[in-house]
Amino acid sequence: MRFKGYSEASMNTEDNRLISVRLWWSIAAVIATLLGVFGGFWWNHERMWTLSARDGRPLCRVQEGWTEQEVSVHCGAPSGRGTQPKVPGGGPFSLQMCSAPGDVYGTKVVFYGCDRKVTTVEQMPTGDFIYPSD
């Protein structure tokens, strides 16, 4: 049966366009969903670092926001202690600065903020860390 005004070639072209549009929208929906899932995971993921002893064996894990006492309980006594020259404190719009401490555990430094909570962990040596040499 033939429809008046339509040829088979034009129907195939319209069908292909419709399938192509649906396919691209489906792919876009899958990509958006994956980005949403990964973004949500990244947003809610708590930052943690593994500290290693000088011989390379894992010592403990440290989480952002822990106090000096919590780090000490989980990791033991630090092998050294130093200070950061000046770090911003009191929030993103605060003008307050402080000389915050840092603890050395093996080959890494645990940096604290002005509130004495873990902000980051970096590999030794670091640029902005005053560590007394033996």
Image (spheres, rainbow, N blue to C red):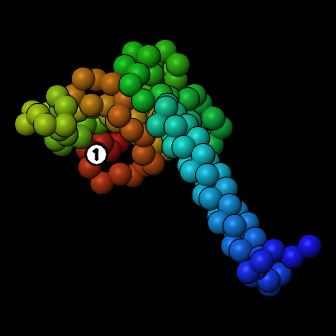
Looking at the image, which residue is at 71% across and 74% down? Answer: 14
The quadrant the C terminus occupies is top left
Q: Nearer the viewer, residue 45 or 61?
A: 45
Looking at the image, which residue is at 45% across and 48% down? Answer: 123
Instruction: Left or right? Give the position of 62 relative to 56.
Output: left
Against 67, residue 20 (above or below) is below
Q: Is label 1 in a helix, a strand or a loop? A: loop
Residue 52 % position (x, y): 57, 38
Instruction: Left or right? Give the position of 1 relative to 122.
Output: right
Instruction: Left or right? Give the position of 81 relative to 40.
Output: left
Residue 81 in view here: no
- Residue for badge 1: 129
Return the residue found at the far left: 95
Q: Nearer the viewer, residue 60 or 96?
A: 96
Against 23, residue 111 (above or below) is above
Residue 107 % position (x, y): 49, 44
Residue 41 % position (x, y): 55, 37
Q: Which of 123 and 20 is in front in this view?
A: 20
Instruction: Left or right? Give the position of 22 relative to 3.
Output: left
Corner quadrant of residue 113: top left
Q: Which of 39 and 46 is in front in this view?
A: 39
Looking at the image, which residue is at 92% across and 73% down? Answer: 1
Corner quadrant of residue 38: top right
Looking at the image, which residue is at 61% across and 52% down? Answer: 29
Return the residue found at the far right: 1
Q: How many labels does the image show?
A: 1
Residue 31 % position (x, y): 61, 54
Q: What amino acid does circle 1 point to?
A: Phe
Corner quadrant of residue 16: bottom right
Against 9, residue 32 (above or below) is above
Against 18, residue 88 (above or below) is above
Residue 119 in view here: yes
